[in-house]
Image (spheres, coloured by chain):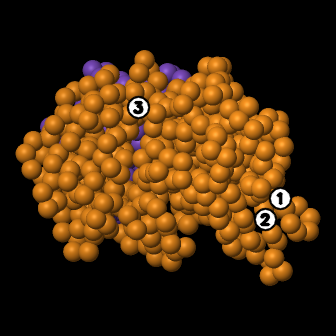
Amino acid sequence: MIKILRYFIILTVVAALAGCGLGPLKKRGEQADTETPDKQVEDNQYSTPSDEEVNKFVSGDTLEVSSLNDPNSPLSQRVMYFDLDSSQIKDADREIITVHAEFLAAHSEITVVLEGHADERGSREYNVALGEKRAKAVKQLMTLQGVTEKQIQVISFGEERPVALGHDSSAWSLNRRVEILYTGY
Amino acid sequence: MIRYSSILLILWLSFSSLAHAVLTIEITHGSEGAQPIAIIPFEWKGKGTPPVSLKNIIAADLQRSGLFAPLPNKDLLSKPHEGSQVKYQTWRALNVGYLVVGKIHSLIDGSFQVQFQLLDVFKGRQLAGYSIRSLNSGLRRTAHHISDIIYKTITGEEGAFNTHISYITVTRGKNNKKRYQLAIADADGYNEKIIYTSPQPLMSPSWSPDGTRLAYVSFLSGRPEVVVQNVFSAKRTILASFKGLNNAPRWSPDGKHLALTLSKDGNPEIYILNVNSRKLTRVTRSYAIDTEAEWLPDNKGLVFTSDRGGSPQLYEIKLNRNKPVGRAQRLTFEGNYNSRATVSSDGRYIAMVHRSQGTFRIAVLERGTQNFRVLTNGQLDESPSFAPNGRMIIYATEEKYRGILSAVSVDGRARQRLSFKSGDVREPVWSPYRVNK
């Protein structure tokens, strides 16, 4: 009964919001990372939207927009990791990217920012270029699966925004990454 | 000749006054070939104590060049303040080649008159003697000026002690938020001035050859843009804000162009931007990463980092009237990571970031001989930048996971750390001669 009622509410919201665009990219707050040599992962960087926002759209496809806020959805995996000096996408990550690509292809109104990063080693500007190369590798895989250019924005911060603040191989491997940031989510 | 063993000899020089930095001198190799020089503390003619120790500043300068080995205080047999008081025989016994003596007169208007003499111990005569008027705030500058005179008199080359550096610092502001700052300081790290602060990353400062402007990368808008800022007026102009990367700006020797990296046409490529007309010329065309362009003297070419061969290496492309000529030639073959070139102003040396067994160090390639030498021994050394006389390289390294700056002589003979009390310091760039202030 609750399920039916909820479905009804969602339909109403969809009708009311049809044609509306999503809000602008939420600015990520700077994380209050403390500088300890220990490995420390920053807090989750994604803002939590209200239920109303999440239910703006309903899709007839495999994954609904509401899945973006579902921690059990495959869409909740949004970080791909890379080997040293490499922008080669790992096999396991191909599946994750495919899930996002199919979702984005089915929801052409939704946009993402692909944020490329590198670890702290090597030169800073080369790392900015490497971060972009990684993000573009993810973008290419997405566009091959029907996501339009307009839906994807690529940005690289190089080594300037580490997630793990340590200085060892496990921290470095967490920092060589591409993050998928859903605009408005 | 005094010879130090290869054991590290660490001299701590502490400075009084308002100085915020603490300098550590670290002699890293036996200083074979470095000239022993005795710098006698300057006589103070005034009330109280002198605001700075000229002797310490001059000694640190000369030490940093790798060409001189200043005597420690305990070895100073006597403390003459003018040439006529010097008993050369006793200094000859110590095998000290040169002696520096002087006085500081505190004047009634708050300024100073500094007299100094450089003496050749073995010939028993004066090589240079000057009397320099110094404003109240300028005693450190006067000390660097004296270092330059000593350096030039003995070596015949221009000194680069009376110059500046620019760099990026990262500190924590209110709410523990990161604050990125563009700073300028004297070449030894003193007299820091913050000229721009941003909550978003700042990167890659580059001096205009006249020392009046800095180009750098700002992420203030949320993505990279190339900005030019006047050092004195703080006026800022956005010069490149294309789609994708707007990175790695480098001012040309003629001062009219910037080499930079843009990815607006696909992947990162090197372009030359005419600063006045804003006309863009594309330099590289490859499927690979091309970035970190650095100019060769007289705008005759660019050295840049590319992974077109599978790993990042340095390449050179010739320019004719700022247009690329022929194919890029690979310059580096040692190891599988060489990046971020800096070229000495005479074009003789190219310094770079070199990876060796998992560590990143500063290495130098002498172009004529192809002699390749690793100069530093850190774990994460980066961002080398030549002094305008090509004798020293300043670079970023780290100590207990905090970014600090170091200088190394181009022969690797001496290394000196410039450490700052707070924050992370990175990406130093050495100014050209004579920044007008």
Circle on res. B43: 1
In the image, A126: left or right of B399? left
Circle on res. B363: 3
Tag 2 and tag 3 share a subunit: yes
Image height of B147 relative to A90, above or below: below
Circle 3: element type: strand
Asked if marks 2 and 1 touch (Cβ < 8 Å), the reply is yes
Q: Amino acid under label 3?
A: Ala
Which lettered chain is shown in orange? B
Q: Along the polypeptide, which appears first: circle 2 or circle 3?
A: 2
Circle on res. B104: 2
**Is residue B100 something that shows in the picture?**
yes
Circle 1: element type: strand
> Looking at this view, is B208 or B11 the one in front?
B11
Using the numbered discs, state the Cα–Cα distance from disc 2 to disc 3 in whole angstroms: 41 Å
Which lettered chain is shown in purple? A
Residue in the image at 7% along x and 45% along y? B326
Q: Chain of mark 2?
A: B
In the image, A65: left or right of B182? left
In the image, B154: left or right of B86? left
Where on the picture, by quarter, is residue B221? bottom left
How far across and down, in percent of the image, does residue B226 sit? 36, 61
Residue in the image at 49% along x and 67% along y? B435
How far across and down, in percent of the image, does residue B170 sit? 59, 50
Residue in the image at 18% along x and 69% along y? B279
Q: Along the polypeptide, which appears first: circle 2 or circle 1?
A: 1
Circle 2: element type: strand
Q: Along the polypeptide, which appears first: circle 1 or circle 3?
A: 1
Say which quadrant the N terminus of chain A sits in. top left
Residue in the image at 73% along x and 66% along y? B114
